[in-house]
Image (tube, helix red, strand yellow):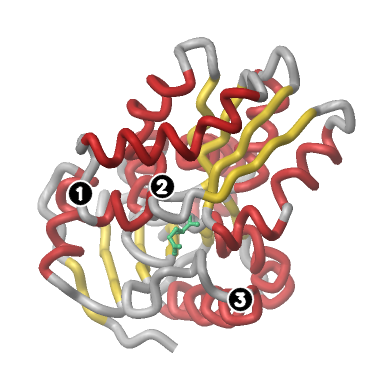
């Protein structure tokens, strides 16, 4: 099974991408809905949660872990990799590699939660790959609650997106990384605001691509993964709203199972 976790249900954007790139692979998802959001918490707290979430997925039989949450990937990737002996994927590196490989001007923007932007991880990784790159980041804390409310096409959301993106537009970036699980759901509005020449990088697709390439190279591991098309979705708190949003994100009825976090 491929184990995926996120602070909540935003990571279902990664599940969706994995289902597309690796159809039939069994998936187990954990959304820490009782402790969401992670984007406003300290890195120590997010690390602790990430270790607990990984342990839970491994206890359920996951053989590969995907950290779908950008905030957890930013601050907890190293701790998770140090503590568990299975392949761990995060969403930052694939998005960074894709941005460097596709950007013409190497003028790259990043949007994410406060914790992700504060960590400086995207800048660090981009500069490691290409020190010439110019990087501009912007925290967009209001976008997560807007997506969770399902306000994907409201004029208010349009206005807020415009305000957040303005400084990046002024810098004339040619590539924009969506550094948060929820932002792929606003991709159309974001693309419209930035203009069609700006290449929008969706980390959910980038990580799904990486997992696929890794499994193609590591056949032993691939053979160990069950492929019966089964998916289980665990959350640490079940509410009607989560179930509704999750169903509309995956465009199929999904049944959230409750498990205590921590
Ligand atoms: N999953 C988080 C991320 O991708 C967004 C929601 C949160 O703040 O927990 O950064």
Residue 165 falls left or right of residue 79: left
Residue 21 falls left or right of residue 199: left
Mark yes or no: residue 66 visible: no
Upstream in the sequence, badge 1 or badge 3?
Answer: 3
Task: Compare residues 224 and 249 and report the one nearer the observer.
Answer: 249
Helix, strand or loop under label 3? loop
Helix, strand or loop under label 1? loop
Task: Compare residues 2 and 188 and report the one nearer the observer.
Answer: 188
x, y percentage for residue 82? 74, 73
Residue that mark 3 sits on: 42
Q: Is mark 2 within 8 Å of ligand 1?
A: no
Q: Quarter of the image holding residue 240?
A: bottom left
Residue that mark 1 sits on: 150
Residues packed near mark 1 inside 10 Å, few (<14), some (14 to 19) or many (20 plus): some
Label count reads 3
x, y percentage for residue 12? 33, 52
Task: Compare residues 259 and 150 and report the one nearer the observer.
Answer: 150
Residue that mark 2 sits on: 14
Disc 2 and disc 3: Cα gap in Å? Answer: 24 Å
Disc 2 and disc 1: Cα gap in Å? Answer: 18 Å
In percent of the image, x 29 and y 40: which residue is there? 157
Instruction: Tell me the quarter of the image containing the C terminus.
Output: bottom left
Helix, strand or loop under label 2? helix
């Amino acid at each position: 099974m491929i184990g995926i976790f996120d602070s909540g249900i935003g990571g279902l954007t990664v599940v969706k991408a994995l289902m597309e790139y690796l159809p039939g692979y069994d998936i187990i998802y954990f959304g820490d809905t009782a402790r969401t959001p992670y984007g406003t918490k300290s890195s120590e707290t997010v690390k602790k949660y990430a270790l607990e979430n990984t342990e839970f997925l491994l206890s359920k039989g996951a053989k590969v872990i995907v950290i779908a949450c950008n905030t957890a990937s930013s601050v907890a990737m190293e701790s998770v990799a140090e503590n568990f002996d299975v392949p761990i994927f995060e969403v930052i590196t694939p998005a960074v590699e894709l941005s460097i490989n596709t950007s013409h001007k190497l003028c790259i923007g990043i949007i994410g939660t406060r914790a992700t932007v504060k960590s400086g991880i995207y800048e660090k990784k981009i500069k490691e790959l290409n020190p010439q790159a110019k990087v501009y980041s912007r925290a967009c804390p209001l976008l997560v609650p807007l997506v969770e409310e399902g306000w994907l096409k409201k004029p208010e959301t349009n206005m807020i997106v415009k305000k957040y993106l303005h400084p990046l537009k002024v810098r004339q970036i040619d590539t924009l990384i969506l550094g948060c699980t929820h932002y792929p759901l606003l991709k159309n509005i974001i693309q419209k605001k930035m203009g069609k020449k700006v290449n929008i990088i969706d980390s959910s697709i980038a990580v799904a691509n990486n997992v696929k390439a890794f499994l193609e190279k590591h056949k032993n591991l691939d053979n160990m993964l069950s492929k019966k098309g089964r998916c289980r979705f665990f959350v640490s708190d079940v509410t009607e709203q989560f179930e509704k949003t999750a169903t509309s994100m995956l465009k199929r009825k999904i049944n959230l199972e409750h498990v205590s976090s921590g």
